[in-house]
Amino acid sequence: MKMGVLGGTFDPIHLGHLGAAEAAIECADLDEVVFVPTGNPPHRPRAVASDAQRLEMCRLATADEPRFAISDIELVREG
């Protein structure tokens, strides 16, 4: 399985993110793109939405596309 990973704060996730994922699937012949909401990057102000809200926004935005998946690995990791 060929998989792509798209990380970002997704605060909020928007059509540009979804379009980039769709383009990656087509251009790189991927089977799946995994959206990975990131933790709080040190170079940016705190996200407006909470981690749980950003994760849920990703789930809702990608629910109708079977080639999209969500990972919470960056939100649950230590450090």
Image (cartoon, helix red, strand yellow):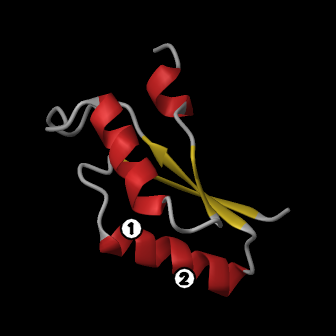
Q: Amino acid at mark 1?
A: His
Residue in front for this viewpoint, 68 or 28:
68
**Residue that label 2 marks:** 23
Task: Name the residue at the top extreme.
Answer: 78
Q: Which residue is mark 1?
A: 17
Q: Residue at position x 20%, y 40% from top?
A: 44
Q: Foreground residue, 59 or 24?
A: 59
In the picture, the quarter occupied by the N terminus is bottom right
Q: Are marks 2 and 1 in contact (CB under 8 Å)?
A: no
Q: Is residue 79 left or right of residue 56?
A: right
Residue 72 vs 4, above or below: the answer is above
Residue 70 pos. (x, y %): 55, 47
Q: Is residue 17 depicted above or below 70 in this figure? A: below
Using the image as rendered, state which of residue 9 and residue 18 is in the foreground: 18
Mark positioned earlier in the residue sequence (2 or 1): 1
Spatial CA span between label 2 and label 1: 10 Å
Q: Position of residue 18 (x, y in %)?
A: 43, 71
**Three-letter residue code for mark 2:** Ala
| Residue 58 in the image: above or below residue 44 | below
Residue at (49% x, 21% y) in the render? 76
Quadrant assignment, res 25: bottom right
Q: Residues within 10 Å of mark 1 (few under 14, many from 20)?
A: some
In front of the other: 59 or 76 = 59
